Image (cartoon, rainbow, N blue to C red):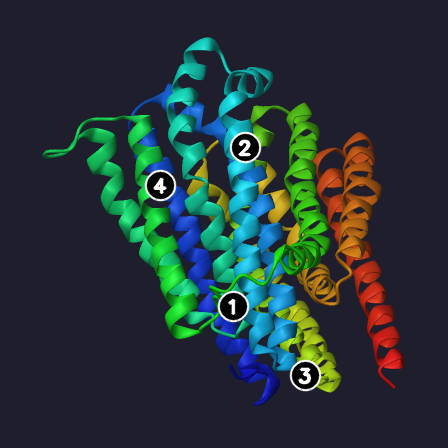
């Protein structure tokens, strides 16, 4: 296996890989939208059940992302070192660790359906629907988490194309299976909400098969030798040293969004509706920067393993400049189109006002939010995932939430959004400084 990211033009390589990742992210969003659209046709109760299920799905997703980040960070560095056997060992052991983690969560999940969703506020009637869905979805976690970890291992090689193809394939399978199993078309039984869960599991199961095929046949990254329990445990420790804080960092973000939503709710349901629209719009605007940070991780890992610190610094510098440029471009577009975008989603005056205020303030810092994400991606590869966790805590609980509270109290929604944006600006400066300090230390240690 060649460390393909250690040669070639830095900017062009990052641009090509980021393009593949953007298609993959669009596929992920489409997957969730397809499910929601078909479930909405069943009725309000079924849609409400999906609303209660979403936080649990986000938690499991954060854990899967954490395991994937740990795997990608270590595998990419090992590829850069030219250690093929180490790549196979790490990839295989990371997948085995994922299986054990999933089995544990399946048991816990199945035993806690009633208390967890009752605590979230589900009524007995909604709880019945949730139980039907989760009795299928929890065992199906195996097909959700393992492909996410495997796809991250594939990305560590610099191959962004096949993971994106796999994600797009899952969307089309889900799109085909959802109406058949939800509404009972043709010979298929009408399963309702359970059909949505079953369609998701089937689509994810097929992605697992494809992922294993690509890992084994295309990249030769699986080992079928038993190295001994000590070696496996050492691999697990290495992965978990990055994965645990990475998962924690990914859990902090939705928690913060929940708190900010609660602050917005003080201004009425119209404000919450407008804020919800804005968070979805900005996901599309930030997708390019999220894709770039995902690509930067294996690029830095391979070059770090190969000792090419010059390319690591070049990639960081180019990525930061692009992030600021893309953020500025997005801010201008959203400022100019704020009102037309608002009218696309609502005619209510208060909802429109909330959307316009948000889209004319917050996008100004999108570029800085990108810098924050890029810094975190590189720090994870540098095996400083606990630093990333600390940065996430500072950003959310020291800057964002207090800023949102103070801004809302002093200047209403404008102040809330303004100080929230300012928190991202200061967070990005801190993260960039933190990364620069880490890189200087690394360069000094390597002579």
As drawn, is 173 to the left or to the right of 44?
A: left
Work out whether residue 289 can be spotted.
no
* CB within 8 Å, label 1 to label 2: no
Element class at badge 3: loop
- Of residue 146 and residue 378, the one placed in the foreground of this image is 146
From the image, tell me which residue sits under label 1.
Answer: 155
Say what secondary structure mark 4 lies in: helix
Say which quarter of the image contains residue 195: top left
Per the model, the C-alpha gap separating discs 1 and 3 is 17 Å
Task: Look at the picture and state if 28 lies above or below 8.
Answer: above
Q: Disc 4 designates what residue? A: 200
Closest to the camera, between mark 4 and mark 3, is 3
Query: Looking at the rendered structure, which numbered label has been put on residue 20?
Result: none
Give whichever of discs 4 and 3 has the lower sequence position: 4
Residue at 84%, 42% (x, y): give it.
398
Q: Earlier in the sequence, mark 1 or mark 3?
A: 1
In whole angstroms, how far apart are the C-alphas of marks 4 and 1?
A: 23 Å
Alpha carbons under labels 3 and 2: distance apart: 40 Å
Query: How dense is the environment of label 1, judged by Cα within 10 Å: few (below 14), some, or many (20 and up)?
Result: many
Using the rendered image of the protein, determine whether residue 70 is visible from the camera's viewpoint. Answer: yes
Q: Which circle's residue, 3 or 2, is located before the other in the chain? A: 2
Disc marking residue 56: 2
Who comes first in sequence, dot 4 or dot 2?
A: 2
Question: Are the residues flagged by discs 4 and 1 in contact, CB closer than 8 Å?
Answer: no
Residue with the mark numbered 3:
306
* Dot placed on the residue nearer the N-terminal end, 1 or 2: 2
């Amino acid at each position: 296996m060649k460390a393909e990211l250690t040669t070639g033009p830095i900017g062009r390589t990052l641009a090509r890989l980021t393009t593949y990742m953007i298609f993959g992210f669009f596929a992920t969003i489409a997957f969730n939208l397809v499910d929601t659209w078909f479930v909405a046709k069943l009725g309000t109760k079924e849609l409400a059940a999906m609303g209660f299920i979403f936080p649990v799905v986000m938690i499991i997703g954060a854990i899967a992302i954490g395991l994937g980040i740990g795997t990608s960070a270590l595998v990419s560095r090992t590829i850069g070192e030219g250690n093929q056997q180490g790549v196979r060992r790490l990839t295989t052991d990371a997948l085995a660790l994922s299986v054990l983690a999933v089995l544990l969560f399946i048991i816990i999940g199945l035993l806690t359906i009633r208390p967890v969703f009752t605590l979230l506020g589900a009524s007995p009637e909604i709880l019945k629907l949730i139980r039907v869905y989760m009795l299928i979805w929890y065992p199906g976690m195996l097909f959700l988490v393992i492909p996410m970890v495997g796809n991250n291992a594939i990305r560590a090689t610099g191959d962004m194309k096949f993971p994106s193809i796999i994600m797009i394939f899952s969307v089309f399978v889900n799109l085909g299976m959802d109406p058949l199993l939800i509404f009972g078309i043709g010979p298929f039984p009408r399963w309702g909400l359970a059909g949505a869960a079953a369609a998701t599991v089937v689509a994810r199961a097929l992605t697992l098969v494809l992922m294993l095929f690509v890992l084994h046949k295309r990249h030769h990254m699986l080992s079928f030798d038993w190295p001994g329990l000590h070696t496996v445990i050492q691999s697990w420790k290495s992965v978990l040293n990055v994965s645990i804080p990475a998962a924690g960092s990914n859990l902090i973000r939705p928690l913060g969004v929940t708190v900010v939503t609660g602050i917005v709710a003080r201004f009425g349901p119209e404000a919450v509706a407008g804020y919800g629209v804005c968070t979805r719009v900005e996901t599309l605007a930030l997708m390019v920067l999220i894709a770039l940070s995902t690509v930067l991780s294996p690029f830095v890992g391979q070059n770090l393993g190969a000792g090419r610190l010059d390319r690591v610094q070049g990639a960081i510098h180019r990525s930061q400049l692009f992030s600021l440029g893309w953020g500025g471009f997005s801010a201008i577009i959203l400022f100019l189109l704020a009102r037309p975008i608002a009218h696309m989603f609502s005619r209510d005056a208060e909802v429109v006002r909330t959307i316009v205020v948000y889209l004319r303030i917050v996008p100004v810092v999108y570029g800085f939010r990108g810098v924050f994400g890029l810094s975190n991606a590189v720090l994870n590869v540098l095996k400083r995932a606990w630093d990333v966790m600390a940065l996430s805590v500072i950003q959310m609980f020291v800057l964002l939430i207090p800023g949102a509270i103070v801004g809302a109290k002093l200047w209403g929604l404008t102040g809330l959004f303004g100080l929230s944006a300012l928190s991202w600006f200061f967070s990005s400066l801190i993260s960039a400084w933190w990364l620069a300090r880490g890189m200087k230390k690394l360069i000094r240690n390597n002579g």
